[in-house]
Image: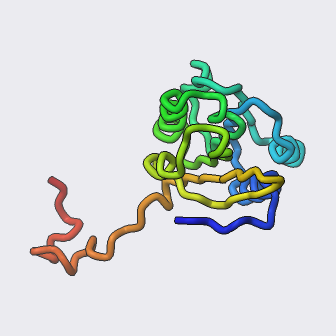
């Protein structure tokens, strides 16, 4: 899936995502400060924001659940193996929603690497020859319910939903 170039800046897209999700608990993994996160924290005093630099999550953060995890300015500074472990661990253990902002040209990642982690391209941003891509993951949107999963297609439709083996 190819996302068209966004008219927004990455910070505007992140600010819109944060406003839409309104996470009570936010995990930010990255080296630099993001103005979108700073603005969100100022306008939402009741939100808890945990920050950690690039690398594996510290033990105190690895045991927590978050409403949203944001990874930016991170994967460009990690090996691909460490990055896969970081993203997979966050997705599987720490959150149901994740956003990753990455410059694919600055690291050895391909879009298919993110697709293998069930992330989708949400937007692409271009400025001064640099392309930054926003990938998102939401467990609730991860897979649509197939049309065949209902009583009509069962051998014994009268038993649908009555017994669990």
Residue toward you, 42 or 142: 142
Residue shown at the point (37%, 68%) measured from the top left: 145
Q: Residue furthest bottom?
A: 152
Q: Is residue 124 left or right of residue 43?
A: left
Q: Quadrant of residue 78?
A: top right
Q: Residue furthest top?
A: 59
**Residue 28, image x and y in percent?**
70, 36
Q: How is the image coloured?
A: rainbow
Residue toward you, 53 or 6: 6
**Residue 14, image x and y in percent?**
75, 52
Residue shown at the point (54%, 32%) measured from the top left: 83
Residue shown at the point (55%, 42%) measured from the top left: 109
Residue 43 in the image: above or below residue 62: below
Looking at the rendered structure, the number of numbered marks drawn on it comes to 0
Q: Quadrant of residue 68?
A: top right
Residue 15 in the image: above or below residue 113: below
Residue 2, visible in the rendered structure: yes
**Residue 133, image x and y in percent?**
66, 53
Q: Is residue 144 left or right of residue 155?
A: right
Q: Is residue 74 left or right of residue 108?
A: right
Residue 15, visible in the rendered structure: no
Q: Residue furthest front?
A: 129
Residue 163 in the image: above or below residue 77: below
């Amino acid at each position: 899936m190819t996302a068209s170039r966004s008219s927004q800046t990455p910070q505007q897209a992140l600010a819109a995502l944060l406003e839409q999700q309104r996470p009570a608990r936010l995990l930010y993994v990255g080296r630099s400060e993001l103005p979108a996160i700073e603005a969100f924290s100022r306008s939402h005093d009741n939100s808890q924001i945990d920050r950690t630099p690039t690398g594996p999550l510290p033990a105190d953060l690895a045991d927590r659940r978050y409403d949203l995890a944001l990874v930016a300015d991170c994967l460009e500074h990690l090996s691909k193996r460490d990055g896969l472990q970081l993203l997979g661990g966050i997705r599987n253990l720490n959150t149901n929603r994740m956003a990753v902002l990455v410059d694919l040209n600055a690291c050895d990642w391909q879009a298919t690497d993110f697709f293998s982690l069930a992330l989708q391209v949400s937007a692409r941003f271009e400025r001064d020859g640099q392309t930054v891509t926003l990938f998102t993951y939401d467990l609730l949107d991860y897979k649509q319910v197939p049309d065949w999963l209902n009583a009509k297609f069962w051998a014994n439709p009268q038993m649908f939903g009555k017994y669990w083996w």
